[in-house]
Image (cartoon, rainbow, N blue to C red):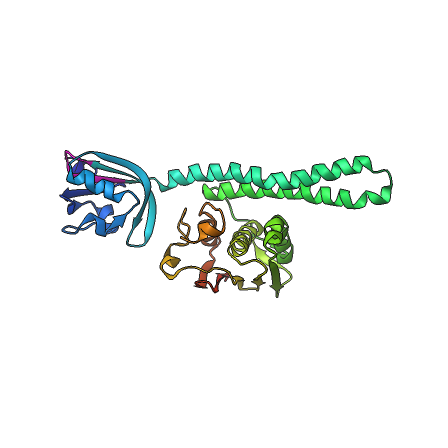
Amino acid sequence: MIFNTLDFLDVMIIELDGYIIKRANKIAREYGFKKGIEIISVFTFNEIDNLISHIINKEDYFLETTIYFFQGSSKFCKISFLKDDSTIIIEDKTEKELIKQVKADFITALSHELRTPLSVAKGNLFLIEDLNKKDKLKEPIKKAKKAISRIERILDQLTMLSMAEFGNYMIKVELFDPKKVFQDVISDLENKIKEKNIELIFNSEIELMQGDPFIIYTILRNLISNAVKYSHKNSKVYVTITNSEIIVEDNGIGIREQEKNRIFERFFRGTDSKKYANGSGLGLAIVKYLCELANYKISFESQWMVGTKFIIKLA
C-alpha cells in the first residue's frame, strides 16, 4: 500500500474512511490529522469543497494551493487524493514556491525601484549639459550623485537579501551610525512617504550601533514601509533606537485579533491589507528571518484601527 511505502518521507499521508481519518503518518499527526476525526476539522483551503466532492464520488484529485492548518500555520502544498487507496497525500512545497516568488519579487523590485532614481539621474545629467554657468551646476550634480548612489545601494541590498533568503548570508558585525541607516531608508521610501504625507519622527539615544548594518537597514525598511503603507494620510510614524531595542510605531489600521498569529507567515496578507496597499506577504517573514539570524527577538502590539508597534530586542 502507498501509505506504508511513504510513511517515513517528509510528506503528510492520511488514509480515509469516507472523509474520516483512519490512519496518518507521523508528520501528518504533527499537523493535527488524528484517527476518527473529519479532515475538514484539521485544515482548509479555498477549494476544499471540491476535494470533499471528489472523495465522496471516489475520483482522483490533484491541486497546488495554500493550505491553512488550524494549528496555526499555512503552507503552499500539492494535495492529492488517490481514489484506489482512499489516501490523501500532502507535499509541502512552500520553500520551492518561496524561491520562485523571491526570484519574481527580485526582478519586479529591481525594475520598480531603479526606475525613479534612474529618471532623476538622467534628467539632471541632461540639465547639466544645457547649463553653462558653473554655479548652476552644483544642485543637479548633487541630485544625480544621490540618485546613482541609491541605485548602487538598492543593487547591494537586493543581492544580499537574496543571499539571506537562500541561507548564504554571513553576518558582518561592525560599528555604524544608526541615524545614517535611518536616512538611507527614508531616502529609499521618499516617494511613498510624500504620497501619503507621513511625518517620520526619529529618536536615537545612541550615536554608534554594533551589528550588521544590512540587517538593521532591512528590518527598518520593511517595518517603516509597512507602517507607511498601512497608515492613514497625514499621520505620524515613530522610530526609536536605543542600545537594547528598535521600535517602529504607527497609528494605522492595525491588525485584526484573529490574524495576529499569522502575520509572520510567508505570503500571508491580512484580509484588509489588500485594500490599502500591494505586497507579496514576504516583508514581515523576512524581518523575522533576519531577527532569528542576528539572534534578536521580535514582538508586536496592535489594535484594530488604532495602530501597531513592533519591538526588536537587540540584547
Residue 177 vertical position relative to residue 52 in the rendered view, above or below:
below
The residue positioned 57% from the left and 58% from the top of the image is 233
Between 49 and 87, the one lying in front of the other is 49
In the shown orientation, is residue 261 left or right of residue 117? Answer: left
Between 66 and 48, the one lying in front of the other is 48
Between 234 and 102, the one lying in front of the other is 234
In the shown orientation, is residue 207 left or right of residue 265? Answer: right
Give the magenta-colored segment's residue range.
82-90
Percent x, y of residue 76: 34, 42
Residue 305 vertical position relative to residue 109 in the rendered view, above or below:
below
Magenta stretch encompasses residue 207 = no
Please say whether residue 293 is visible from this viewpoint.
no
Percent x, y of residue 212: 56, 52
Please say whether residue 64 is visible from this viewpoint.
yes
Magenta stretch encompasses residue 83 = yes
Q: Quadrant of the N terminus?
A: top left
Percent x, y of residue 102: 46, 40
In the shown orientation, is residue 9 left or right of residue 19? Answer: right
Q: Residue furthest right?
A: 133
Image-quadrant location for residue 141:
top right
The residue positioned 15% from the left and 47% from the top of the image is 20
The residue positioned 34% from the left and 39% from the top of the image is 93
Percent x, y of residue 297: 45, 59
The residue positioned 83% from the left and 38% from the top of the image is 131
Between 39 and 206, the one lying in front of the other is 39
Q: Disc count in the image?
A: 0
In the shown orientation, is residue 216 left or right of residue 122? Answer: left
